Amino acid sequence: MVKSLILLSGGLDSLVSLGLKKEELNIELALTFDYGHKSAKEEINASQKICDYYGIDLKVITLDWLKDITFTALVSDRNIPVGNQLTDLSDSAKSVWVPNRNGLFLNIAACFADSFGYDYILIGANKEEGQTFPDNTQEFIDAINEEFKFSTRKQPKVVAPLIKYIKNDIVMLALNNGIPLELTRSCYQQGEKHCGICESCMRLKNALKANNDEKYIKELF
């Protein structure tokens, strides 16, 4: 029987990926990373609630050094772009870019897969974010799978269930499959609720609006 692990940030994409593939790929473990980013506490709390809901283990991995080599607004004192500052998503992407983040996270996950025999590693990469973040593309997934043929004995396969979907579709999949969106944490900022004006929040809010879901808009924001 196959078994899998997932990169879980607590956000929309990793939550929906888990909900869709939990049984099919026998997801047993989630890895959540704390690299000193502003919303780390909220993401870890959300990830724990999601893991409790789905009955899987959570491992939080601290990467203290990563915050020291990046100037991303997610970590530094720089303001995270919000609202009308988001007209150019390519500029916003630069301000929240963490060097080699997905590559690093997936390589750490591959260490777990190689040591404990996991067949698949899931990541919430998707078409919409792939338009501005190159490590959310199919090309990136293909390249890192090729790497693991050489860097691991187990040769786990990285799977991105949402790679062909934009946020509107991802929310629709969640609603149609009973995935608990109330557990998601997709905000770059700290706070009990989503700020509603950072890039990640606006993507989620717009997708909820496109699906006419006022319930989750009121609950999350």
Image (cartoon, rainbow, N blue to C red):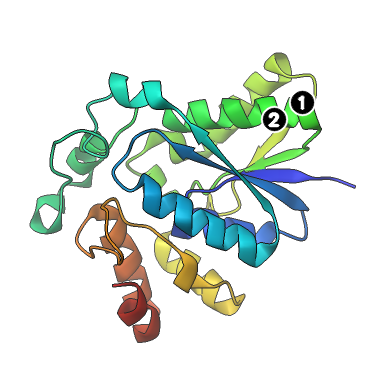
Q: Residues within 10 Å of mark 1 (few under 14, many from 20)?
A: few
The residue lying furthest to the top in this view is 150
SS of the residue under disc 2 = helix
Q: Residues within 10 Å of mark 2 (few under 14, many from 20)?
A: some
Q: Would you say residue 205 is visible in this rendering?
A: yes
Seen from the viewer's position, the closer of residues 36 and 129 is 36
Q: Residue at x 73, y 31 (%)?
A: 113
Percent from the top left, x then y, of residue 182? 46, 73
Percent from the top left, x then y, of residue 157? 71, 35
The residue lying furthest to the right in this view is 1
Percent from the top left, x then y, of residue 125? 50, 46
SS of the residue under disc 1 = helix
Q: Which residue is mark 2?
A: 112
User: Vertical placement of 161 versus 183: above or below?
Assistant: above
User: Vertical placement of 110 versus 88: above or below?
Assistant: above
Q: Which residue is mark 1?
A: 115
Left or right: 122 as drawn, with respect to 83: right
Seen from the viewer's position, the closer of residues 165 and 123 is 123
Q: Amino acid type of disc 2?
A: Phe
Q: Residue at x 77, y 61 (%)?
A: 23
Left or right: 197 as drawn, with respect to 54: left
Do residues under tags 1 and 2 come within 8 Å of each other at their CB atoms?
Answer: yes
Distance from Cα at disc 1 to Cα at disc 2? 5 Å
Q: Amino acid type of disc 1?
A: Ser
Find residue 3 and report its image quarter.
top right
Q: Quadrant for the C terminus, please.
A: bottom left
Q: Residue at x 32, y 39 (%)?
A: 37
Find residue 72 and report its image quarter.
top left
